[in-house]
Amino acid sequence: MTKRTEIATLGEFGLIRHLTEKIKLTNESSVKGVGDDAAVLDYKEKQTLVTTDLLLEGIHFDLTYVPLKHLGYKSAVVNFSDIYAMNGKPKQMTVSIGISKRFSVEDLDEFYNGLELACSIYGVDIVGGDTSSSLTGLTISVTCIGEAEKDKIVYRSGAQDTDLICVSGDLGAAYMGLQLLEREKNVFTGDRGFSPDFGGKEYLLERQLKPEARKDIVEMLDKAGILPTSMIDISDGLSSELLHLSKESKAGCRVYEDRIPIDFQTASMAEQFNMNLVTAALNGGEDYELLFTVPLSMHEKVADMKGVHIIGHITKQELGNYLIGRDGGEVQLVAQGWK
Amino acid sequence: MTKRTEIATLGEFGLIRHLTEKIKLTNESSVKGVGDDAAVLDYKEKQTLVTTDLLLEGIHFDLTYVPLKHLGYKSAVVNFSDIYAMNGKPKQMTVSIGISKRFSVEDLDEFYNGLELACSIYGVDIVGGDTSSSLTGLTISVTCIGEAEKDKIVYRSGAQDTDLICVSGDLGAAYMGLQLLEREKNVFTGDRGFSPDFGGKEYLLERQLKPEARKDIVEMLDKAGILPTSMIDISDGLSSELLHLSKESKAGCRVYEDRIPIDFQTASMAEQFNMNLVTAALNGGEDYELLFTVPLSMHEKVADMKGVHIIGHITKQELGNYLIGRDGGEVQLVAQGWK
């Protein structure tokens, strides 16, 4: 049996001490971390990037199938992804959690293990946060702070007519992973003796449960001397993100269905579920890949880049935002979001 | 009748646009605000301060008697208070909210009006955030970023033996305001025709519902050429905060009951409620006053300062942390916190 220590046995200050005493600062810019009214950072001549995400139980995650360690890892990584999408480097993070009595000290240790694993892999320091009791479920709020050289920050707004539209990795897998977990959860709820079969679908689960931020792509572009004209990370689905880039850049776009990178596990799962594969790739969300544009003159350089796919090009704004199907048909892109 | 626009009519992106389109950036250090993957700040030679707070409905606030505009104002101010407590200036803020269907667009407008009022008074820019649907109630997460000159940051850890312990304003009023609101709520719940009587207790309500951060005290100290040796804001009660200062400074403290500043409304309310006044002042919380230490040589300067009270002095660590009663009796200070 796993040990269960009630949070009440530690109290608020004891819990904070327990969760934060192991935390070490590794970045030169982290002057003072947890333990004062505010953290102190020193970015010297660099500019500071700030991003934040709110994650609520029942909305963003389901603890029936999301292990707390994975949740910690993902909570951190999705914020790092936003910093990379500015062509920056994540350096510090604050983590606030609201916890109901359902959770034990061991549960929070698991969550923090995930956070700390992500931090050690991506070189980020936890410098502050807030802990609170909660009436219902788990609330997580992460703010990530990063640095970038002033002239190298990439906004959503710099895409120009004829720029190539590129995407890293592949799309739709995280969404298919979610569908799979939801299906197995429903089956499981009906039959207590059932054990879920995820054989051959590990990639989909990993994309959903343990996503990575594309630090490698940002570094590769830098090494190749390519500064994207615009960039965004794909958290809400390719379609939404393309529309953000277009809007902010006052441009239009044309992307080609047959160019959208999709893993074979994603395709096979979509078939099993009888779902439209392109819809999953366009609107699925949670891919945390990078969508960026580069000048047409960079064609050769990006075409040869491992893990980067050219999926279309930027047009003048009045030409709108379109997906060109395999049959040559054009479909206007529409935004998704929660209602 | 007040207008009620369902959030669903705007959708996620429409809601974000609606809430953020009026936001203007006023600080030179705010390079890019809402509308990209991360905000961009430029603090040049200054150091960066970061603090964050999580506010949950039913734990930190009760919407039965807290108007949403006040809640917005308070959510901002409590974070500014943490930045002032480092002897810094708050400059930017991110605001994340999780909202259930119970809330309308007008409700959120009220909340944002409060946030924006606080921002305009304290000179802070809203530069980002996250909005999400929520299954239950309202979740608020605010992160505040501020600046300070490297040599002027005041930590909790700098208090020295014989330093004077000072506190701004008065204590216990916010707690008494909360007791009053809770009592009227209970009476109100019992009798629909009842209208609460707050006459003569306005100060207590204001301290609970619309607290201010002590920007003025920080500026006054700077003007007088006084750099505190340690500082903290009083959010959890004087007792807890004194223990934080002592612990971080590896020191002890002695504070005198008859020196603790208490407003007459607080005292009269405590009598009505038959509550111990000193307990309310020591453990009440939410005062958002500043607790700081200065060298003994500064005695004359701080003694003359309006709104500042000398309540005791720092001792060697082995002497512990004590409150000296009016009768000369000594009581050991103990920490409070949620369980």
Image (spheres, coloured by chain):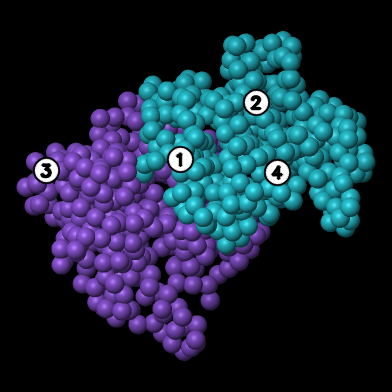
Chain colours: A cyan, B purple
- Which three-letter amino acid code belongs to the residue tagged 2? Arg
Residue at figure coordinates x 83%, y 43% from the top left: A180
| Chain letter of the residue beneath label 4 in the structure image | A
Same subunit, tags 4 and 1? yes
Residue at figure coordinates x 53%, y 76% from the top left: B1
Foreground pick, B55 / A106: A106
Which residue is labeled 1 in the image?
A128
Foreground pick, B78 / B124: B78
Q: Which mark is residue B232?
A: none
As measured in the structure, the alpha-carbon distance from the residue carrying label 1 to the one carrying label 2 is 25 Å
Same subunit, tags 4 and 2? yes
Which structural element holds mark 1?
Answer: strand
Mark toward the start of the polypeptide (1 vs 2) = 1
Local crowd at mark 3 within 10 Å, few (<14), some, or many (≥20)?
some
Image position, residue A113 (x, y; %): 60, 37
Which residue is labeled 4 in the image?
A67
Local crowd at mark 4 within 10 Å, few (<14), some, or many (≥20)?
some
